[in-house]
Amino acid sequence: MSKYLVFNIESLENLKFSSTNVQSDSEDTNEYIPGTSIRGAYIYRYMIKKDIKDINQGEHRDKLLNGKIKFLNAYPIYANKRGMPLPKVYFARKDELKSEQNKIDMYPGLGQDLGAGYGKVRACEFVGWEKDSFYRIKVDKISNLHINKMNNKEPNKLFMYEAIKAGQSFQGIIKVEDDEYIEEVREIFENTIVYLGGSKGSGYGKCQIGNISIMEENPELEYFDQSLKGQEIYLLALSDIIYRNEYGEYKTYIEEKDLEKELGLEKVEFIDSSIETKAITNFNNKWNCSTPIINGIKAGSVLKYRITEELNLDSIKKFMDKGIGERRIDGFGRFIILDKIDSATLYKEDEYKGKMMREKVLYKPTEEEREIATHIINDIYKVRLMNDIHRAVIEMDKKLINQDKMTNKQWGNLEGIITSFSYEKPKSGKHKYAKYMENINSKKKYFL
């Protein structure tokens, strides 16, 4: 029976997750941590722990390559919970979209004519959800200008990198198909530093994983109403979906035949959809090249179908737990099924600042670790202090004149006076040092 491990990721450095592999002079970043990146970090630590170099054989292949362990995307946190993609079915009045007010009244655009005065809501990618209210999650980003040094025959190229700003929290999910793997996953990831995304050798990607908890049921069912009614269903994509039909054609909607099979229904009829597509590709290390670009269904997309029979709750849960389409091992193909999508209110973060506080995932050290860290910090401080003292002595030495005429006694007096300052409180020591230097300089004997 499948179980889920829910965990938090704290970004300790800026994170780069390119939204496309197309080469250009600027590169946007995803606002979430892809499951494929988390999976790569897990495999790296797994190979170190197991002291293996090849995962293509035996139990390693079964766990890591055949889908016994699946890594879902990590989404930004709202009120200590994993956020969800904003459903792309919502519209609002254009004057509200342009206004600075703290909330927007949203209406579903499937099955009703809203008129010319409405526009699609694109206020954010991710939201927190409570009943009929959505709360915008703003993912802070930065942009950095980099230079790509070419060979002598080609000019250097400037390009802009966008990255997720450090200090933000995300919540991820790992689906484990076999109970015996649970403790192993926890041991490898609990309170662990990992590096995620691109440019890991250039100051990007450092993260800390913690707060791992085990759930018996799919945590994404939080958004699922188990009292399904009516003759219409909505499929809401909780992640990007790569779907191919029985003829091998990539499609931007889920064909009725597959839904009939998975839900155990005689007839399912596609009605309408409100979707966005996404160019999906990745880099294959074995082939050392990027895979072909595929048009997938973007997270948040909504597809509407008509049914004539009563839905079986167990079949729906099993279908949602399984996912749909390709690359499910990397977090693709996640969705929920709803029987209605109601009007809702989207609140901006300014008014609900208290609710928008992101949980900080900080490792709690033991007392022994605290003492070690204190000694290290004190040693660093002492080294820096000595370096500053050496620099001050050198600067003072530059101001001394007639040094060769100073007697040992005069040198001893100078050393004793300066040493005495170290026993004073900082403020009084600085004051006495200033008075001493003023007195020495006034004599014009040893100082300029």
Image (tube, rainbow, N blue to C red):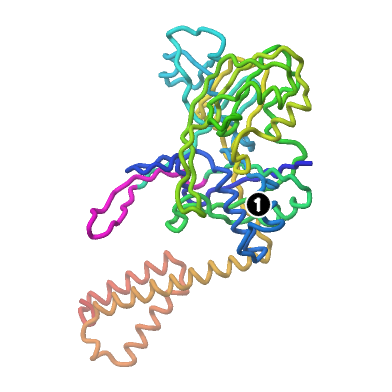
Q: Nearer the viewer, residue 244 or 41?
A: 244
Residue ID for mark 1: 64
Instruction: Tell whether 182 sits left or right of 101.
Output: right
Relative height, residue 314 to residue 116 (above, below): below
Examine the rendering and report whether any part of residue 421 can be seen: yes
Magenta stretch: give its range.
145-167
Relative height, residue 78 to residue 409 (above, below): above
Rendered residue at 62%/36% (across/down): 82
**What element does badge 1 sit on?**
helix
Rendered residue at 51%/20% (across/down): 103
Residue 150 belongs to magenta span: yes
Q: Nearer the viewer, residue 428 or 24?
A: 24
Instruction: Tell whether 347 sits left or right of 26.
Output: right
Badge 1: residue crowd in 10 Å (few <14, some 14–19, many ≥20): some
**x and y, in percent, of residue 375 in the image:** 58, 70
Examine the rendering and report whether any part of residue 354 can be seen: no
Looking at this rendering, what residue extends furthest in the front direction?
Answer: 247
